[in-house]
Image (spheres, rainbow, N blue to C red):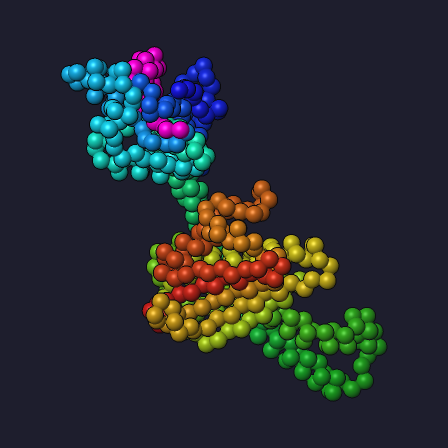
Amino acid sequence: MFITKTPQQSMPDRPWSPTYLNLQSTIQDLFLYDFQVEIDRLGEEVAKQFQSNPTIPGVILSKNGQLKGMLSRRRFWEHMSRPYSLDLFYKRPLASLYVFTKTDVLILKGETPIFEAARQALQRSPQLLYDPIIVELNSGVYRLIDIHQLLIAQSKIHELTHQLLEEKTYANRVQTEKMASLGRMMAGVAHEIRNPVNSVNGNLSFLDDYYKKLIELLLIYEQEIGQKPNRIVEFEEEIELDFILEDTPSILQSLQVSAESLIQIVASLRNFSRMDSRKQQIVDIRECIDSTLLILKNRIKNSVETIKNYQEIPPIHCYSGQLSQVLMNLLANAIDTLMERKEKEKNFKPRIEISTQVIENYNGARGISIKILDNGMGIPPEIQERIFEDFFTTKPIGKGTGLGLAISYQIVTQKHNGQLNLRSEVGVGTEFEIVLPMENAV
């Protein structure tokens, strides 16, 4: 017979405390009792140990080193306090007492999570609710855990879970408010830019028309005057009139193209700024993609080949700003991994391929598929399982919040009843697929 206390993490000169626990803690991390006797030992030996160690919740019974069962402190004294029990069991082997007290014993592996152990313990019958649990640390190595300590530990795990949930909720609120603030700011900037840009774009056609008429007037002057005075000839040479006449149409055309580009950027900003909109709108997904690419143009141009494979898809009812946020997150992540691979491989040619199509079998119905494929680093299988978790990121500190893909997943699945699928192979690339139900189509 022997008694020790485990685990080693608990200091022998102070009581066990749940403050050392975390969400991954298992029952082998708790304060365990090692009180084990051979079943043929006398009842008085166990009684003396219970009297001298009032915290021991029970005794493990074995025969020739093999587990036979467990006798709780409560049941031991319950039978010992009955009439004639001392005479019957005190001086006799524990086997005779165990015949009358034998019950189902809960045996759990040491790596069982605390919350799972508490759940199984509370599912026992009311008669066994306060009996200790046997913990199997290794093959043939058993310890006891007091149910009171298990419930305290489970309460601590619940507290930690609640705390983590509050942190995640707060982080989501901060991120949502940040994106909403960004959306409002972008909407304001887009509104301020739109009027002068429209003015420039609208007046360019008049400017082009006026230029052509002035040139026509100069030609008439030349025809009517005939021989130009020396002063006019000298001034034409000074200002390089021939070059001005040749270059001005190109300048006007360049201004026209730039103005149209600015109008597209303003439209993209206005579309992206609708993140906090609570109403669904009719949107052409391909226009959303193009608007997002336009915003990211500075990161893509001259460095990433962009291939568009757009098949005909109908407009859909959706939260356009939020869906644009998803596209922004996926495309920005694709650019990040492409740039990472480009730094490592000199001859690497970054490529993003975007495709849209109608699929025939989405949960038994038709759906709309948007795929974003890159030839970047790829994602290892062990990371793929956690890629949509809150706060999970593989980026260095300060470069990623771990919320982009988590929020994207929530927007697609919860807001639009769709799916966000991932396929990736290390060294080959990654494909994200957004699948939206066809019932949202117009």
Q: Residue furthest left?
A: 83
Residue at 30%, 15% in the rendered image: 44
Please state, as top left, top right, bottom left or bottom right, where the N terminus lies in the image.
top left
Q: How many marks?
A: 0
Residue 52 lies within the magenta run = yes
Residue toward you, 369 or 128: 128
Residue drawn at the location 57% of the way across and 60% of the way down: 425
Q: Residue 137: x, y in percent? A: 44, 33
Q: Is residue 225 magenta?
A: no
Residue 302 x %, y %: 67, 64
Which image quarter holds the C terminus? Answer: bottom left
Name the image quarter holding residue 221. Answer: bottom right
Where is residue 230 drawn, in percent x and y? 84, 77
Work out whether residue 196 or residue 272 is closer to the camera in this orientation and state it: 272
- Toward the viewer: 5 or 250? 5
**Residue 23 percent across, percent down from the top left:** 43, 36
Tell me the magenta residue range: 43-64
Residue 224, can we see it? yes
The answer to whether one can see residue 153 in this image is: no
Q: Residue at x 58, y 42 (%)?
A: 397
Q: Is residue 415 above or below residue 171?
A: below
- The answer to whether residue 235 is above or below residue 78 is below
| Residue at 48% in and 44% down | 391
Query: Is 82 located above or below residue 258 in the figure?
Result: above
Q: Nearer the viewer, residue 267 or 310?
A: 310
- Quadrant in the rendering for residue 257: bottom right
